[in-house]
Structures are given as C-alpha cells and as structure tokens.
Amino acid sequence: MADPAVHPLPSFTGFDFPEQNWFKMPNNWTDLTSEMSSIAEMKIVEYILKHTWGYQEYGVKKAITTDEFRNGRKRKDGTRLDKGTCLSKQSVITGIKLAIKRGLLEEEVDDRDKARVKKYYFLRMKKGGEPQESGGGVKKLDSDVQSLDTGVQDLDSQGQTFGHRTEQEAIERNQQQEGKSYGKFDTTENNNRGIAAALVKRGVDNATAQRLANKHTRDCLLNNIQWFDHTLKTRPQKADKNPPGLLIRAITNDIAAEGHQQDFQTQQQKEMVRTKKKAALAVQQKLLETLKQQQVATLKQQELARAKQLEILRERHHTTAQDGKLWQKILDKLRAELSLLKFKTYLAHSELLSLKNDQAIICVPSHFIGTWVEKNLSTKLQQLLGEYSNEPNILIQCRTLDAPKIE
C-alpha cells in the first residue's frame, strides 16, 4: 500500500466534467471490489482498466513493468504518463497475483529474449463476445457517435500486437479514426477530440481546449504541446504561475514553429534533421564504397603487373622447376625456425630465380625486404642452399619486384 507519510493526501478540488477524461467501469465493479481484501489488487486492475478501456481498447495486451505499475507508464522520452499506483514493489507483485488468481486479469509472458523478459496483462473477457483479433482492440464508440455513421464500428479491426501506445500515439490513432468518419482531420472546423483531451489534461478548461482544437491545425497543436512539455521539464520556472496560460499562448502564437527555445525541436524538425543525417550518411557510405572499389582495382592491377614482371625475370634467369622445388624445401626449413610474422613478411612471397656458378638470385617483393634478407639471412641461406645443392660459398643476391606505377 502507499505510505501516507511518503504520499500525503492532497486536497481534492473536484472531478472534471466527463468529456475526454473518463472511461466506463464494469457494472459489476462494486460487487467485485467488495470481495477484494487487498487495495493492491484493486489498484492493479483499475490501472489496467485505465490503460485499455481508457483508450477504448478491449482485449488488448499491455506490456507494463513493475516500475510502471508503481510510478506510471513511460513515454518514449522517459517522462511519465501518470502517477501509477504508488504501491511498493512487493504490493504490485502481490496485487497482480491476486487479480490473476481471482480471474480478473490474464498474464502472457514473452521470454524469447531471456535477458529482457516481457509480461503482458489484459482483462479477462467473457467468451462468446464480439470477436477480437489477437493483440488488437476494437474501439467502441458511444451510441451518439454511432448514429452519425453506421460504419464507425469498423474504424479499427487490427490494433497493435504486444505494445502500449504513448499519449501522442493515442492522439494520432483517435485522429485517424475520426478522420474516417468526418473526412480529412486536419481542417480547422473538425472537432479534434484527442488533442482537446490532451489540452484538458494539461490544465486548459474544456471550452478553451475545444476552441483551440477547432481553430488550429493538427501540427500546430501537437508541436506546441510538445514544446510545453519540454519547457515544463527543462525550464519549470517559466510556467510556475500559470502553466495552462503558457500552453494557450504557445498555441495561439505558434511558439514551437518560431523556435524561441534553442534546445527544442518539433517532430517535423527532428525528422528533417534525421533525413539530412541519413542522406549525408548515404553519401559518405557511397564515397567509401567507391574508394574501396578503386583500391581493390588498383591492387588488382598491381598484382597483375607484378606477375608480369616475375614472368620476365623467370625467362631472363632461365628459372626451372627444379629451382622452385629446391626453394620450397628451403622455405619449409625456415618456416620452422623463424617466427610466423617474420616468415610472412620477408619470405612468404620470395622465389629462387636461379642457382648457378655459386650464385643464388632470389626474387623478393621490395627493396626493403631484399636488404633485410641479405643482411639477416645470407649466412643461413648459404648454409641451406649448400646442403641441398652441394655448392659451398654461395653468394646471395636479391632482385626486387617493386610495385609498378599505375597510370
């Protein structure tokens, strides 16, 4: 249970008139609560009622964490939609277990990712009611709305699978549904009920909220609501005296579009920045890919040029198959004696061009490698070549195979 010392009881000023800030409770709710011995169980069920029926969603599965049950559902930016139940962690767990045991709630566990197990909760509905698609919710409008259009009941038959909507997403969905009944939603004469409800929630009176929703465009309303929330979070002193008045002035003057706050961007501006970054990244990636292809082509040309040079040297020195076999034996011997790094750097691409008149001519990739081989391996090569060829005092000379210039 909530601790009165931690959460002191405020002075309640009265309920708002039921327009957009309420949802229907089951007719047998008082009978159900009379059987509950735990306030935690009642709070848990009411909280799920709020976040399903409160958005006119029935049979929808909601992923709600223990932290969100305690402190309120989170928006995408990390801010809270509401105050939650203010229960302790253990009370939340106990309340969920009691509600499931009593049959009021059903729980579904998604443990495909063991590191991030998700639990979904939804009200247990009677079988044989109106068909619901898995994970979706059919918005049931009041009878006065149904009389306007016989097709209103079919506004949304899909819903969303496993996931809760943020407040803005709920507004967007309401707008889409109303647009199907009343025509294009963005015209100023439409009654933007979803946005009006968001204004009322932020302290604007009902009449002013409806007037603003009818007068201003959807983008103007949403952008300035976002600006208002951002201002309350980052500069609360700006709205200390009259937050609703600040929101009304913001919408009236379209402050969000004028960019009065440097650290704030509208959704359109954010999307524009993302689009520019994405385009710049695509250009950069394309440039890198072009450079990579050019490098591959250059290396290929160099390899072909080296192969041609090597073939010329073989013809010039009359290299034989016997020379190749002898050099392979030398390399096998040196591979076992040298470190792998030294062998790959200085000998892996070497070749014996000829062994005549006590002189061994070895082809190496570059002048640097040739100098290192003559300085550090001449004695060892003389010894090995003498053992295999029976020719003592062999002179070691290196011929370089430097990469030719590519025009």
Image: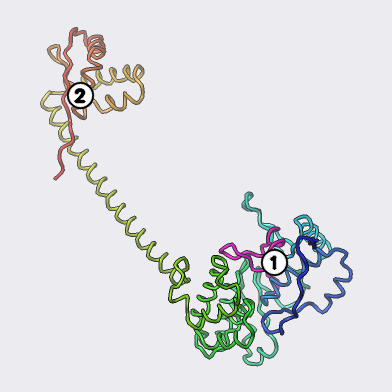
> Looking at the picture, does residue 322 appear above or below residue 93?
above
Which quadrant is the N terminus positioned in?
bottom right
The spot of residue 126 in percent (x, y) is 78, 73
Identify the residue shown where x is 60% and y is 75%: 241
Q: Which residue is mark 2?
A: 370
Query: Does residue 74 show up magenta in the picture?
Result: yes
Of residues 27 and 276, which is closer to you in this image? Answer: 276
Q: Residue furthest bottom?
A: 147
The spot of residue 268 in percent (x, y) is 45, 72
Tell me the chief SS of the magenta region.
Answer: loop
Q: CA distance from mark 1 to mark 2?
A: 77 Å
Q: How many marks?
A: 2
Q: Secondary structure at mark 2?
A: helix
Point out which mark residue 210 bears: none
The spot of residue 134 in percent (x, y) is 66, 69
Q: Disc 1 marks which amino acid?
A: Lys
**Where does the magenta region start and end?**
58-82
Residue 159 in which image quadrant: bottom right
The spot of residue 106 in percent (x, y) is 75, 64
Of residues 216 and 379, which is closer to you in this image? Answer: 216
> Looking at the picture, does residue 322 appear above or below residue 160?
above
> Looking at the picture, does residue 381 appear above or below residue 211?
above
Q: Which circle's residue, 1 or 2, is located before the other in the chain?
A: 1
Of residues 291 and 395, which is closer to you in this image? Answer: 291
Of residues 153 and 10, which is closer to you in this image? Answer: 10
Q: Disc 2 marks which amino acid?
A: Gly
Point out which mark residue 83 bears: 1
Q: Secondary structure at mark 1?
A: loop
